[in-house]
Image (tube, rainbow, N blue to C red):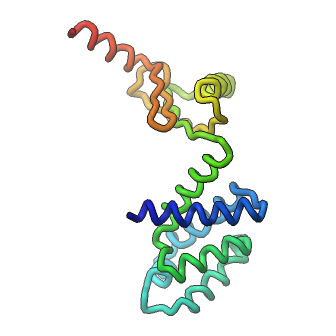
């Protein structure tokens, strides 16, 4: 349920960002900065989560944080909406959903790429070029290291997994020999 609610808020924010011509990356950064500020302060977290604190006081707290955090007017107003509808606790989930919605609207896909060893910039560029060709869309990569792959790499775009790892090939060989 909270995922559906977060997606609804994320789509609304994406509509505002798109219609206002704002930079989605900057908006996402502002949301993450605010979320980090809330996470780092127990008092702030308690104030924003407490039903005992009136919404105007919560709005005043957000207004005070807006300037030091560099929050745009649209982001500040969005946070006010979250306060008014008691959804501040979903801010992290909304941020992830916003990122996914903006990727979808901009024709991008996210790729989780795991390699056995760190990749050079040239290797990363080759992998991105191949994944862009395979997916037909611009790829936004997330690189990680997974020593259990033994060698090679795996890439996951949505529900599709491309396995070019030594571990994957050994597993396929084991299945063929067992059958």
Which quarter of the figure is the N terminus placed in? bottom left
* Residue at the extreme top of the image, as rendered: 177
Residue 34, given in percent of the width and then of the height, sits at 60, 69
Residue 73, given in percent of the width and then of the height, sits at 73, 75
Q: Residue at the spot x=48%, y=74% of the render? A: 87
* Residue at the extreme right of the image, as rendered: 21
Report which quarter residue 78 is drawn in: bottom right
Q: Residue at the spot x=59%, y=39% of the render? A: 109
Q: Residue at the spot x=21%, y=9% of the render? A: 179
- Quick one: 42 or 22, which is closer to the camera? 22
Task: Say whether residue 115 is visible.
Answer: yes
Side (left or right) of 85 relative to 106? left
Side (left or right) of 90 relative to 62? left
- Quick one: 56 or 46, which is closer to the camera? 56
Query: Count of labels shown?
Result: 0
Report which quarter residue 9 is drawn in: bottom right
- Quick one: 105 or 127, which is closer to the camera? 105
Q: Residue at the spot x=53%, y=56% of the render? A: 97
Q: Is residue 152 above or below residue 143?
A: above
Task: Say whether residue 120 is visible.
Answer: no
């Amino acid at each position: 349920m909270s995922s559906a609610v977060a997606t609804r808020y994320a789509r609304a924010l994406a509509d505002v960002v798109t219609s206002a011509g704002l930079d989605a990356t900057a908006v996402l950064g502002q949301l993450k900065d605010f979320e980090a500020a809330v996470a780092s302060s127990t008092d702030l977290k308690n104030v924003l989560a407490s039903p005992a604190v009136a919404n105007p006081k919560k709005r005043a707290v957000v207004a005070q944080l807006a300037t030091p955090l560099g929050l745009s007017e649209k982001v500040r107003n969005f946070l006010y909406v979250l306060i008014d509808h008691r959804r501040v606790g979903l801010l992290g989930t909304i941020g992830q959903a916003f990122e996914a919605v903006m990727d979808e609207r901009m024709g991008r896909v996210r790729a989780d790429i795991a390699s056995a060893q760190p990749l050079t910039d040239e290797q990363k560029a080759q992998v991105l070029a191949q994944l862009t060709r395979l997916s037909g869309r611009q790829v936004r990569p997330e690189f990680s290291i997974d020593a259990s792959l033994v060698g090679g790499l795996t890439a996951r775009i949505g529900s599709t997994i491309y396995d070019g790892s030594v571990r994957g090939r050994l597993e396929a060989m084991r299945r063929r020999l067992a059958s």
